[in-house]
Image (cartoon, grey):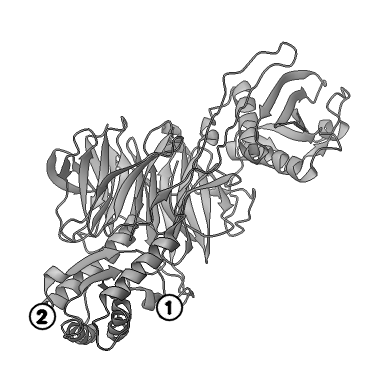
Amino acid sequence: MKRIFISIFIVMSVQLFASDATIQIVKKIAKEKKIAVANSSNQSMDRSLNNKILKLIIGDLKVSSHFNVATNYINRDYQSTGLVSELVQNGTELLLKCKIEKSAGSLNASVKLVNVKNGERVYEKFYSISKAKRYPFLSHHIAIDLNEYLGMPSIEWMKRYVIFAKYVKSGSSNIVVSDYTLSFQRTIVSGGLNIFPKWATNAQDSFYYTSYRSVKPTLYLVNLFSGKKTKIASSSGMMVCSDVSDDGSKLLLTMAPHDQPDIYLYDLASGQKKRLTSYSGIDVSGNFVDNDSGVVFISERLGYPNIFHKNINGGKVDQMVYHGRNNSSCTTYGKYIVYSSRDKQSSFGKSTFNLYLISTQTDLIRKLTTNGKNMFPRFSSDGESLLFIKHMGKRSALGVLRLNANRSFLFPLNVGKIQAIDW
Amino acid sequence: MKKNIIFCMALTSMFLVGCAQKAPELDSSVINTSVPSIGSNNGTNLDSQIDSMAGMNSNSSQSYGSRDEMIQAIERELQPIYFGSDKYNISMQEQEKVDADASVLNSDMASSFAIKIVGNCDEFGTDEYNYGLGLKRAKSTKDALMVAGVDSGRMAVTTEGEANPVCTESTAECWQRNRRADIELLP
């Protein structure tokens, strides 16, 4: 985690699957292995699918920020052993040959890593996937395994599911499970207003979400595999599961049984609720911190939304952020807090929301984004990456920010607008 | 109205097996995920039943064919209450609308209905705070209506954050129209 603190300076952006032209690359990372990807598939292979898989592998290697990867793949026979002069000349060190094949009931990939300097094979693996539409995970696994083989820091998070709510029309939103690039998507809850999905376990086998189908907003727990849906609690006014404790036994809920949004600690085993805040204005978005002994939350008790802390067992409320006048969402990892802050409007009247990183133990602030509406930050499970929502007019995108590499990537949602995310 | 029906959609599973080509060996990296779907598939039938029941209940009404029609007629008289950016206090200008709405809600035709007040926000913010802000707008409207003589026991509040815009243009006028509390009647 120290690397987070040392390395984050100004967010860098690399164009991947979408362009974010207003974000500038300000720094190059040194000592990245120079690698190229080769298309080694037969002519009979579905060209569109083949292209998607290869582009995703290239994208994954870029997002890892551990490689200097060529943007376009080259064509190279899988079995050929000769040197590739163009790669030798431009200093490429490694060539990843990928041969994608479709067979009855499966999609197969053979990958071979070749040392460009001597043409020797240094690594080879075979993959098979039963459903072609899950090809993004095939690409992610290829990148993860290659990254691991070469001894780079883990990028296991790439194979985790992202769960998000997206507005499909006024008053209606669906819950969708996807990969981190949005290349794979499956709608799992639809009909009515379904918002604020939250994984219930680290294993991502179940999730919470709020449904507006009943008279009162109601929190449900859904098992992703069996489809079993369990009502957890409901509250007049508002009901959101903001966070789940590390062991999954407790929830931080925002409820309003007396028309006032406040934060409650909910014990799943006993069903007991404990009110943690009692401000007469707005208290929302509780996040567990300090091994679940404290809660960081958003409150407008100073007249504008800002970030505060309180021990679970009571005591005074402490202001955590002394920057900005509209800090309306946050995420925590250890001693670090990332929050979204509404910056001053530009002369064109456009508001910007940027992400900032602070430590609870120092006064330093790092600005992570520089433009647009960057909201709803969520730390990865290893704390080295951030997922966030970037709104662009009527559209929105998933943003991935690699904290220790100072790079961000955008993955636009083609239809709908993202409401909330978790991963 | 209950339309919650669970149905399972495609069973989707993915098996990733990695092995060295020379000496085949099963890798342990196996994903086996089935993702069922939840949604509604008979909402229309339930809707029509409820509509039908509501119509039967309102046969005694003098002016309207159904209770729903009566509700719609009353709701046309109600005005949304608008709020400033990031605000949930009711301005003097909006107070006049609150008073007018209270008169409608306490009229003979409307006084038997329960009331739902829904707070809404503009597009700035998709987070919980936006939903909290919407709730406070609904609560402020409820309190103002109560002061204006509407029985608090008739009123319930909720929030839909930025989920229910009446205008989707990126203009100041449009954002203003979305920062509002809607007053609805419950059958």
Label 1 SS: helix
Residue drawn at the location 16% of the way across and 71% of the way down: B154
Q: Seen in the image, is A351 located left or right of residue B32?
A: left
The image quadrant where one finds the N terminus of chain A is top left
Image quadrant where residue A60 sits: top right
The image quadrant where one finds the C terminus of chain A is top left
Characterize the local packing of mark 2: few (<14), some (14-19) or many (20 or more) Cα atoms within 10 angstroms.
some
Label 2 SS: loop
Q: Amino acid at mark 2?
A: Gly
Q: Chain of mark 1?
A: B
Q: Amino acid at mark 1?
A: Cys
Q: Which residue is mark 2?
A: B149
Viewer-side residue, A34 vs B16: B16
- In 3D space, how far apart are the residues under numbered discs 2 and 1 (Cα atoms)? 31 Å
The circle on residue B174 is 1
Residue B29: horizontal and vertical position, in percent? Answer: 57, 23
Is residue B153 at all visible to an observer of this figure? yes
Residue A78: horizontal and vertical position, in percent? Answer: 83, 27
Q: Seen in the image, is A59 located left or right of residue A247?
A: right
Residue drawn at the location 74% of the way across and 26% of the way down: A110
Residue A115: horizontal and vertical position, in percent? Answer: 77, 23
Q: Earlier in the sequence, mark 2 or mark 1?
A: 2
Relative to A279, does residue A313 appear above or below in the rendering? above
Characterize the local packing of mark 1: few (<14), some (14-19) or many (20 or more) Cα atoms within 10 angstroms.
some
Is residue A371 at all visible to an observer of this figure? no
Residue drawn at the location 74% of the way across and 16% of the way down: B21
